Image (cartoon, rainbow, N blue to C red):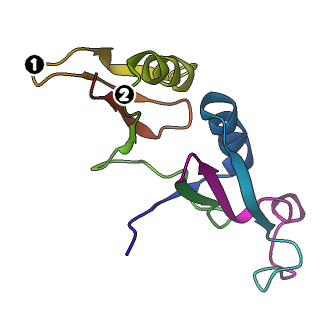
Amino acid sequence: MQIECYLTFGGECEEALAFYKQCLGGDITALMRYEGSPMDSPQLPPAWKQKVMHATFECEGARLMASDGMPGQPRPAYAGFNVSLFVPGDAAKAQRAFDALVQGGQVTMPFAPPFWGGHFGMLTDRFGVPWMVSSEH
């Protein structure tokens, strides 16, 4: 069994995944567009045909899936969860990931040693996605 994160964007899914690839490494291993899919119809706005119906991003054994919601839906307001990025044994690598992800976003809690040990920080990226970044050292 695996529990994985699936993010929905309001038209900027491909841009967000390219940003995550730049920040974290990894690869976009699957990307399907609305055009040519069962969701493609005359009612689908032409500008939406190239939006992402489903995508998978993989990085060091972790997987994140994402898509653009249907046209006309508001950009999701992410609340009540965080994408958790744990970098085992390498606080410097975790710091680099934190610094990259927060570009154009907002720090919620600076990346620093918390009272429980290791390193930890929280941010909201420029797409509105909340992240927790941690390392045990």
Residue 123, by quadrant, is top left
Q: Which residue shows up at 84% across the image and 82% down it?
A: 41
Whether residue 94 sits left or right of residue 52 in the image: it is left
Which element carries disc 2, helix, strand or loop?
loop
Image x and y of residue 2, in percent: 40, 69
Residue 84, by quadrant, is top left
Q: Amino acid at mark 1?
A: Phe
Tag of residue 89: 2
**Other-residue count near label 1 (Cα within 10 Å), few / some / many at <14 / 14–19 / ≥20:** few
Q: Using the image, determine if residue 57 lies above or below residue 4.
A: above
In the rendered structure, which segment of residues is drawn in magenta?
41-61
Q: Which residue shows up at 38% across the image and 19% down it?
A: 91
Q: CA distance from mark 2 to mark 1?
A: 18 Å
Residue under label 1? 115
Asked whether residue 59 is drawn in magenta, I would say: yes
Residue 37, by quadrant, is bottom right
Q: Using the image, determine if residue 19 lies above or below residue 26.
A: above
**Other-residue count near label 2 (Cα within 10 Å), few / some / many at <14 / 14–19 / ≥20:** few
Q: Which residue shows up at 31% across the image and 14% down it?
A: 110
Whether residue 78 sits left or right of residue 75 in the image: it is left
Image x and y of residue 87, in percent: 41, 33
Which element carries disc 1, helix, strand or loop?
loop
* Near-viewer residue (7 or 90): 90
Q: Using the image, determine if residue 78 lies above or below residue 32.
A: above
Asked whether residue 133 is drawn in magenta, I would say: no
Image x and y of residue 14, in percent: 74, 48
* Near-viewer residue (96 or 129): 96
Task: Tell which circle, 2 or 1, labels the residue nearer the N-terminal end.
Answer: 2
Q: Amino acid at mark 2?
A: Gly
